[in-house]
Image (cartoon, helix red, strand yellow):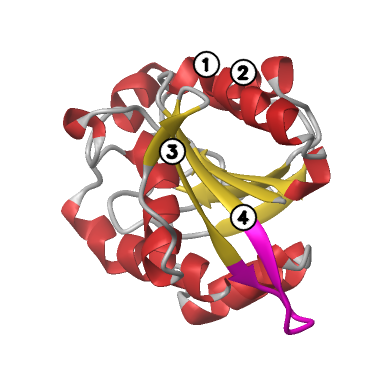
């Protein structure tokens, strides 16, 4: 079984926040690939379905949106991994990344939390070596502004890339389901090229390819 998680905070007041971009992508995957209804399980909203692979077969997949709030995301993901005996190589987590320019998607496996509390929780309460789909949201330019920045709605200028990127993440899913993370990253960026520079300001952090 493949487990694909998106990170965010539960409730309508958080829905448009930059920190909830993981939820947004998971919703788009569920819609595009006709997953079953959302149900409460593993302290999460979960939906089951099947995704196509490069071999022409399909893989059973569990989508989850932890409802534990961001700082305890790993608790929910860890419960699901333990219950289904899912290896970290079969877990993909979508989340916001300050150290990538807006609209960039970069895949990686393992590594540190880079200041992201949701990832820190996954490392501690699930497994450090899950696959990560990092969605660039840019940086506000000053560390003191980060908290309010991630817990604010996307700017109007971001509309030009956020919806196309979510669509591309769902459309290219065959490569992700097949474990072809580099091909997935390339195809997502082909389908939804990132804007050149930061459309909101000139303070985006330089791209981090860790």
Using a 10 Å C-alpha cutoff, classify the residue at mark 1 as few (fewer than 14 neighbours), some (14 to 19) or many (20 or more): some
**Label 4 or label 1, whichever comes before in sequence order:** 4
Please state the horizontal and vertical placement of residue 165, each as a whole percent of the image. Answer: 42, 66
**Label 2 or label 3, whichever comes before in sequence order:** 2
- Separation of marks 2 and 1 at Cα, in angstroms: 6 Å
The residue where tag 2 is placed is: 121
Point out the residue furthest to the bottom here: 56
Using a 10 Å C-alpha cutoff, classify the residue at mark 2 as few (fewer than 14 neighbours), some (14 to 19) or many (20 or more): many
* Residue depicted at 34% across the width and 22% down the height: 145
Q: Secondary structure at mark 4?
A: strand
Do tag 2 and tag 3 residues touch (Cβ < 8 Å)? no
* Residue depicted at 49% across the width and 52% down the height: 101
Please state the horizontal and vertical placement of residue 148, each as a whole percent of the image. Answer: 29, 23
**Label 3 or label 4, whichever comes before in sequence order:** 4
- Separation of marks 2 and 3 at Cα, in angstroms: 22 Å
- Separation of marks 3 and 4 at Cα, in angstroms: 33 Å
- Separation of marks 4 and 1 at Cα, in angstroms: 22 Å
- Separation of marks 4 and 2 at Cα, in angstroms: 22 Å
The residue where tag 3 is placed is: 139
Say the numbered circle drawn on residue 143: none
Q: Foreground: 104 or 75?
A: 75
**Label 3 or label 1, whichever comes before in sequence order:** 1
The reply to whether the magenta stretch includes residue 23 is no
The residue where tag 1 is placed is: 72
Q: Foreground: 157 or 180?
A: 180
* Residue depicted at 56% across the width and 72% down the height: 188
Q: Secondary structure at mark 3?
A: loop
Do tag 2 and tag 1 residues touch (Cβ < 8 Å)? yes
The residue where tag 4 is placed is: 61
**Label 4 or label 2, whichever comes before in sequence order:** 4
Q: Which residues are magenta?
A: 51-60
């Amino acid at each position: 079984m493949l487990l694909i998680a998106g990170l965010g905070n539960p409730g309508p007041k958080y829905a448009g926040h930059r920190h909830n971009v993981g939820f947004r992508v998971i919703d788009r995957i569920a819609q595009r690939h006709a997953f079953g209804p959302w149900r409460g399980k593993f302290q999460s909203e979960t939906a089951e379905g099947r995704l196509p692979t490069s071999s022409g077969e399909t893989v059973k997949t569990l989508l989850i949106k932890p409802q534990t709030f961001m700082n305890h995301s790993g608790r929910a993901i860890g419960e699901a991994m333990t219950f289904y005996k899912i290896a970290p190589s079969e877990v993909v987590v979508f989340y916001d990344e300050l150290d990538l320019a807006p609209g960039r998607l970069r895949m990686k496996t393992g590594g540190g939390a880079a200041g992201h509390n949701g990832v820190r929780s996954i490392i501690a309460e699930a497994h450090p070596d899950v696959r990560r789909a990092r969605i660039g949201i840019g940086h506000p330019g000053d560390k003191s502004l980060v908290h309010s920045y991630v817990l604010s709605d996307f700017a109007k200028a971001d509309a030009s890339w956020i919806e196309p990127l979510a669509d591309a993440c769902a459309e290219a899913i065959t490569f992700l389901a097949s474990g072809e993370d580099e091909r997935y990253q390339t195809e997502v960026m082909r389908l939804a090229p990132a804007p050149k520079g930061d459309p909101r300001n000139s303070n985006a952090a330089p791209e981090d390819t860790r």
